[in-house]
Amino acid sequence: ADVLPDDAVLAVAVQRKDRPEAHALLHALAELHVHGVPVSWRPWFADTGARRVDLPTYAFQRERYWPEPAGRPRQTATHGGDADFWDAVERADLTALAAQFGDDGAALDALTPALPVLSTWHRARTRRAVVDGWSYRVGWKRTDITADPARPGVWLLVTAEDDLADGTRAEAVTKALAEVGADVVRLTVDPVGTDRAGLARRLADALADGPVTGVLSLLGLRDQPHPTHPAVPVGTAATLLLLQALHDTGATARLWCLTQGAVSTGDGDTVHGVAQSGLWGLGLVAGLEHPQLWGGLVDLPDQVDATAWDRLARVVTGSGDEDQLAVRPSGVFVRRLVRSAPAAPDAAERWRPSGTVLVTGGTGALGAHVARWAAANGAAHVVLTSRRGERAPGAAELREELTAQGVRTSVVACDVADRDQVAALLARLDEDPAPLTAVVHAAGAGESGLIADTDLAAFAGVLDGKVAGALHLDALLGDRPLDAFVLFSSIAGVWGSGGQSAYAAGNAFLDALAEHRRGRGLPATSVAWGPWADGGMATGEAQRLLARRGLTAMAPAEAVHAMRYAVGLPRAALTVVDVDWAVFAPAYASARPRPLLDDIAEVREALHARAEEQPGGVADALRDHLLTLPRPERVRHLVDLVRTHASAVLGHAGTDRVKPQRAFKELGFDSLTAVELRNRLTGATGLSLPATLVFDYPNPAVLAENLLDGLVPEAAQADDGDPAEAAVRQALATIPLARIREAGLLDLLLNLTDADGGPRDESTDEALDLDELDTDTLVRLALDGTDS
């Protein structure tokens, strides 16, 4: 007070003991700015890439349209208190360095000649740190799970007809299950000729004799190509059909599936059942879409003896949460995702492009990024393939771009799913003066569809380019020397992705093929990618949805660097993803435990924090609260619950856009968002809900009625009203409001309630929004109208 002039109207603190100096100063300047004091912000935004943008031409209403501030780039932990110095070094900014050294001109003069080298070194180190943070691998660890108490009961064993090997295995499995106390019922099916409806009827008959503890399928062991869709092994196609048929029966017994040699548990354990590996991707998605129906996957060793069968029987009848296991002569192993060891400084330099580099899917977004990198780093000839070749969007422009860099570039029309076309392409490359040194298989297409809605033709369509193309390249290249053989896989094949069963199966196959090639002494690297920025399978709204789930799109330059790093590693597969586990893990594990992620510290912390936030159980608290409410209020409460979670899944700031009677399909739900909503509601209610939730129940109002039936016992609901109300509610709950309106009955119903011809809100005497009406409001209006 002694140093302030008498006419001072504002004082701000530029130093605070509880804040860093830069933060406190920035806060002070902001306070001055909002009080009208002119402040120049140019120095703050210098060298950040920030730019001015035009304001929207309309007033902001209801929602905030400003982008959330990203802040300044995060510094690596190695910077310590020298972040400003290293930022200046990375930018090779002599002016900023001069400010760091102050009056020490001699030090600056000594550093200046070395600045370009130091800047390059620091950028490489920073990039390596980023890639290290994105890098994970699948590992296996031994477990004593076979010591868990058994839950034998009755097991349905599904085998293939006319398969001598299956018959022998079925006898061994039956004996092993019997020895742990289980009774076995056999069901043999034709894995190729059986249709969905027929299989569902046979399953219903088999399950009708009494409660079944579990279903164990040997169908996945059939690895010959399907006669109609060769890209799909018979066992994978049959398992897809079995999942769908079990879903159709409403079965609750969990399905376990067997493979043999489809995974590698570590050194000395090679993959020899590559064709069965896609079943692992399908199973991962089944665990997401049908968490109450799916049991798990068990991989058998090459030679299965009595001990292995006994371990299998104890695994499937055990009481634990493990759902991805391998039985080996040395014991039982469980699958885990773990962080990859930090990269060696020279890992990314071990592959330098030269000669001819072939990129399948090269005109797509990811393939184009790889092509640009290869052209800029030593390739003499870059060959880009796609089904349409030069006619693919952007293909001609990409070829001109690479040619302008002085690199010979060919864009070739080649369907890699066609073996003859691949053979002809490789024959032409053999005649090229620049020898083929590397192959990057980035071809492939995604799909979006729940398992229950995916037919075999659609499933095969996804696998054609990705799986068949990889197989043709592997077979036709043989053992010729290559610097790199890179397969573009996806995290869908590592931990699954709702609505992408075929895509997950194809990518799991690529990971196994890379393991198989490495086992044969050939170069192979499979990279399971998370989402890429500036292209890739997820773009636009899909990319924003993934970001809300904790999966951030990776910058292409860093992703390509990660690919180089992966090629230099002594292992066949690497998972590269920028994931916020605190966001991703709770949603991923909302429907059931996911032991796959147990060995990641951030996941354990996130799940522990969620458990502490919900000590009494959200589902129990919801039930208790509902029991204190009259029935109409219960439904309204659940409608609000559904609208809240639906709005969050769709990325809306509030629930205004999610009307109780608006169809989920009209709101923009697809198979991916349907699974996410199901997972959220499962966590909130504790109910076993199907992945087809938004397709089975057309809108939030009808879904809320169904949730109430599952949460509150019928006896508790029986005391809630007279028969007339129950009858009206039952009728209206099953008929969408739109159908009532189309039939001309809505106006008649509402005219009964108000002389002015429409319903009104009693609290405001205003007309009600018809799209806001829920079933209970309609019931009340109907009963009030008939009484009057």
Image (cartoon, grey):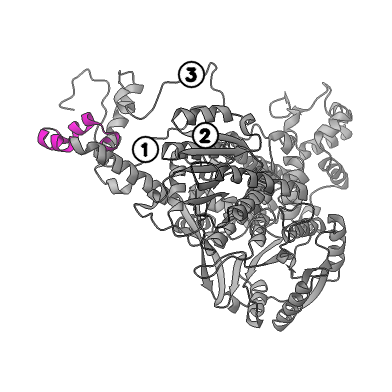
The residue positioned 85% from the left and 56% from the top of the image is: 195
623 relative to 367, above or below: below
User: Which residue is nearer to you in this view: 692 or 425?
Assistant: 425
**Looking at the rendered structure, which numbered label has been put on residue 409?**
2
Q: Earlier in the sequence, mark 2 or mark 1?
A: 1
Q: Quadrant of residue 638?
A: top right
Residue topped by disc 1? 73
User: Which residue is nearer to you in this view: 566 or 81?
Assistant: 566
Q: Nearer the viewer, mark 3 or mark 2?
A: 2
Q: Which SS class for mark 2?
A: strand
Q: Is residue 280 magenta?
A: no
Amino acid type at mark 3: Leu
Amino acid type at mark 2: Thr
User: Which residue is nearer to you in this view: 51 or 456?
Assistant: 456
Looking at the picture, how far across and down is residue 107, in whole percent?
A: 13, 38
The magenta segment:
88-112
Q: Quadrant of residue 250?
A: bottom right
User: Which residue is nearer to you in this view: 408 or 537?
Assistant: 408
Q: Is residue 98 magenta?
A: yes
Q: CA distance from mark 2 to mark 1?
A: 36 Å
Residue 455 can be seen in this image: no
Looking at the picture, how far across and down is residue 394, in whole percent?
A: 58, 29
Q: Nearer the viewer, mark 2 or mark 1?
A: 2
Q: Earlier in the sequence, mark 3 or mark 2?
A: 3
Residue topped by disc 3? 55
